[in-house]
Image: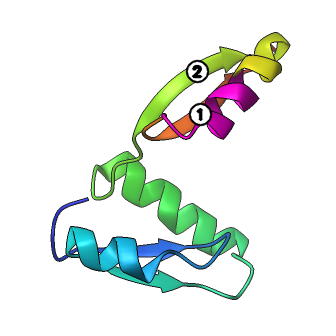
Amino acid sequence: MKRGGILVSLTQPPSQENAQKHGVTAKFNTKFPTYKNLQTIAQLIADGTIKAEIDSIFPLSQSNKALEKSESQHGRGRILFHINA
């Protein structure tokens, strides 16, 4: 995220201290996202308007490694699972 950007968290209140340190505005949406909200976010990602940074992708069988990575707080971006259908 570049300076001057707006971070909107849907899961927990973001750190205002970290936001100030990085020159962004941090907001918390206390409402549960609706299907329409999620569609809008998905479209913004598809259009390239917002970018979701992916740190790593694990097969579901390695969920323990994904959890370790998440808890280490050394990742940068989302940690995803690849699920074979």
Relative image position of residue 80 (x, y in whole percent): 63, 31
Q: Nearer the viewer, residue 62 or 41?
A: 62
Relative to 44, residue 31 above or below: below
Q: Is residue 12 left or right of residue 5?
A: right
Amino acid type at mark 1 = Ile
Q: Secondary structure at mark 1?
A: strand
The residue sitting at the left extreme is: 3
Its colouring scheme is rainbow
Question: Measuring 48% from the left and 34% from the top, which residue is drawn there?
Answer: 75
Viewer-side residue, 10 vs 22:
22
Task: Provide the residue designation for mark 1.
Answer: 79
Q: Which residues are magenta?
A: 66-74
Q: Quadrant of the N terminus?
A: bottom left
Residue 3: mark:
none
x then y, percent, for residue 54: 45, 34
Give the structural element (helix, strand or loop) at label 2. Answer: strand
**Which comes before the other along the chain, label 2 or label 1?**
2
- Splitting the image into 4 quarters, where does residue 63 fall? top right
Mark 1 Cα shell of 10 Å, populated few (<14), some (14-19), many (≥20) = some
How far across and how far down the image is residue 79, in percent? 59, 33
Left or right? Give the position of 82 relative to 4. right
Q: Residue at x 49, y 63 (%)?
A: 41
Q: CA distance from mark 2 to mark 1?
A: 6 Å
Mark 2 in CB contact with mark 1 (< 8 angstroms): yes
Mark 2 crowdedness (10 Å alpha carbons): few <14, some 14-19, many ≥20: few
Which of the pair 60/64 is nearer the observer? 64
Q: Position of residue 68 (x, y in %)?
A: 71, 27
- Our reading of the magenta stretch's main secondary structure is helix
Picture layout, residue 83 above or below residue 70: above
Residue type pointed to by label 2? Ile
Residue tagged 2: 57
